[in-house]
Image (tube, rainbow, N blue to C red):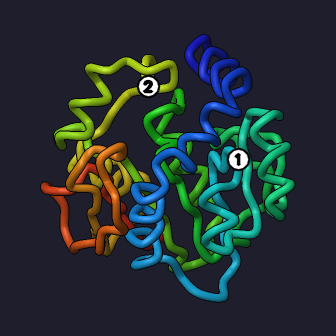
Amino acid sequence: MQKKKNMRNIFGRYYERYDAWYDKNKFAYLSELEAIKKVLPRDERGLEIGVGTGRFAAALGITTGIDPSKNMLMIARKRGVNVRLASGERIPFKNDIFDYAAIIITLCFVRNPGKVLKESRRVLKKNGKIIVGVVDRDSFLGKYYQKKKSVFYRQAKFFNIKEVRNLLATTGFCRFSYYQTLSKPPSKTNSIQKPQKGFGKGGFVVIAGEKR
């Protein structure tokens, strides 16, 4: 519980710094969007868990989001996202109502990843899609962030891709696909990188699965 409270306080306090990162590292952000688009359903109802300031939801057309930080949601709301103050461990929606759920970067910050994935599965329709974007712990970028110990990543629990897949499989997802991007640190990425299938080379990896 303490970790969850600490992370909420950190994002609530430094929400402007968090949001400014996307402008400062524009091409890394745009590259991540391109990777997510490879697996994102079109014209369907989606939910972003850990929507933050709405950077991904607004750009990807995800109309609904939840986050435990009031300050982050204030900005997401201005970007046109329908938001609610809530955590991924307790999603405030009924069963079987979303076509897909996106968890972008957020998984490394939550207190109980398994519970977040179970809740995500609960609100998905039959054959609904889960989309998880992570910084691969085993990649150059994951190792960099673990050493850097930034204000945001200081208490993060990084995962490698096999661990994420196992978590997803354990919580009732199947038929996985993977896309990767970012072959350079965000500060040195000066053009939009084309996403590649698989994982093992890119620092940012998107894993998509289907509700069993």
Camera sees residue 185: yes
Answer above or below: position of 52 versus 207. above
Q: Earlier in the sequence, mark 2 or mark 1?
A: 1
Q: Is residue 212 left or right of residue 148?
A: right
Please report contact status of discs 2 and 1: CB closer than 8 Å, yes or no: no
Numbered label attached to residue 162: none
User: Badge 2: how crowded within 10 Å, few (<14), some, or many (20+)?
Assistant: some
Residue that sits furthest to the top in the current view:
2
SS of the residue under disc 2:
loop
State the residue in front, 137 or 152.
152
Camera sees residue 163: no
The structure residue drawn at horizontal position 46% and vertical position 64%, both measured from the top left corner, is 30
SS of the residue under disc 1:
loop
Spatial separation of the CA atoms under disc 2 and disc 1:
17 Å
Q: Which residue is mark 2?
A: 153
Residue 54: where, in percent of width, then height?
Answer: 69, 54
- Total tally of numbered discs in the picture: 2
Q: Amino acid at mark 2?
A: Tyr
State the residue in front, 58 or 178.
58
Q: Amino acid at mark 1?
A: Thr
Give the quarter of the figure containing the N terminus.
top right
The structure residue drawn at horizontal position 39% and vertical position 64%, both measured from the top left corner, is 31
Answer above or below: position of 177 versus 85. below
Q: Is residue 17 left or right of residue 12?
A: left
Q: Which residue is mark 1?
A: 53
User: Badge 1: how crowded within 10 Å, few (<14), some, or many (20+)?
Assistant: many
